Image (cartoon, rainbow, N blue to C red):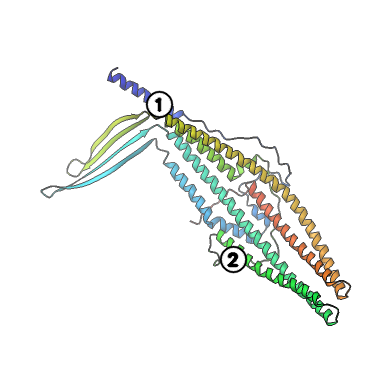
Amino acid sequence: MGTGQLTKLVGSTVLAGQLAACSVGPEYKQPTMDTPPRFSVLAADAKKPVPTAPWWQGFKDPVLDELVSRALRDNIRLNQARRRVDEAEALALTAVPFVDVNGRVESQLASSNVGDDRSLASATGFATFFGPRKHRIDVAQARVDLARAERDGARLLLLSNLISAYIDLRFVQERLALKQRERQSWLRTLRDLRSLQAQGATTRLDIVQPKAALAVTEAEIANLFSEITRQKNRIATLLGAPAGVTKLDLGYGGQQPMPHFSVAAGVPADLISNRPDIRSAERNYRVAVAEIGVAEALRYPTLTLSGTVSVRSDTDPVTGGLGVLGANIPIFDQGGRQATVTAREIQANIAFLEWKARVLAAIEEVETLLASMGNTEKAISASRQGVALNSEAVSLARKLLRAQEISVLDFVGLQRNLLNAQADLAQNRRQAAANYVALQLAVGAGSVSTAIVPAY
């Protein structure tokens, strides 16, 4: 075979390899799976959730609205996630050129015997045509989408942490208010008993019991003040502000947060497009599929073009030109390259299974929360009735105590029943608010902002 024939053969092989490299790899298809047509527990509102909905406004709490607004603007972690989107978009631009170009630049300064200096600068490099370029662009774009989904996930995480902290703060403040009323109640009971003691109608044991309860209550009040400080510090950090220094107007107005609207739960299939964690898993799968294409393309020949450009101060301004047009034909390491393709295929399958697992976990979470919300509403109704009945019982018992028609032990027991009922009502209200928040997050509501303004 002559040199010309060999050249033609190599050229044909390279050209065929280049064309094959552009078309290899699986075509990405959106993952799908069968989901139930509806949730087993019917929601009060079955409309499709809106990712941009400011659902926290359903609490009708101006203080909470202001806190959310500040956090969405200033939170450090959320702004980091936004910058990661910018980073991914910038990196995606590096995958756009038609060729991959690499090289180096060198310069040197020389002196002659007559004192004249001359300088020399040269640039050498090579450009690679075809190859895995198309698939690397797919990878870069998928990473941009992944960064955006993770940004939306960071937004939901912030909403979860901030609003939960606010609900916890109001719950602790309600407990403190209850404990302060409890303290006044024990003091009132002690005054009544001392009046009876002056008449010789009570014993030392009758006095000791409410005094012991009063001491326990005062200890609990001190601990609640510490917990209030902890929750305020937690909120300050979520606002991107130093804890303990930032002044927040979080005085308690006597009302725990309670939602005034129902949750638009939609149907299970809506979770696939609404939830950021599922969208992140889908983007990871897309990246893995694109990586298969990159690995496949590297099994085929690539074409390189090298060249040099030189500049000397003592000659014409520019000299140089293109060098050798060469081909890289992978032959001896095909086994290793095929193994890489197989590994990428396995990784893609793992990513697909992760996506399915997140869909199933999301459906489970929404189902559980829908059931919990209905049960919590029943618990609140029962707790209200319990507080009303126990309040009436204590009021009647106090009159009997003054008339010495009921023992101190019985009265103290009735008073504790009222305190427990009040604590249960506060806890159930807290749980109702927490369930509302958790369900909104579980269906992906509020994950996307229409007006994001980073702090920096």
Which corner quadrant holds the N terminus? top left
Residue drawn at (53%, 54%) of the image: 77
**Residue 276 position within the rendered picture, expressed as x and y whole percent measured from the top left:** 58, 45
> Which amino acid lies under the numbered mark 2 shown in the image of this protein?
Leu
* Circle 2 residue: 248
Front in this rendered view, residue 67 or 201: 201
The answer to whether 298 is drawn above or below residue 180 in the figure is above
Question: Do callouts 2 and 1 mark residues in contact (Cβ within 8 Å)?
Answer: no
**Residue 96 position within the rendered picture, expressed as x and y whole percent measured from the top left:** 42, 38
- Crowding near the residue tagged with mark 1, few <14, some 14–19, many ≥20 C-alpha atoms within 10 Å: many
Residue 357 can be seen, yes or no = yes
Mark 2 / mark 1, whichever is N-terminal:
1
Residue drawn at (70%, 39%) of the image: 38
Residue 453 can be seen, yes or no = no
Front in this rendered view, residue 278 or 274: 278
| Residue 259 position by quadrant | bottom right
| Residue 408 position by quadrant | bottom right
- Crowding near the residue tagged with mark 2, few <14, some 14–19, many ≥20 C-alpha atoms within 10 Å: few
**Residue 122 position within the rendered picture, expressed as x and y whole percent measured from the top left:** 25, 41
> Which amino acid lies under the numbered mark 1 shown in the image of this protein?
Gly
* Circle 1 residue: 17
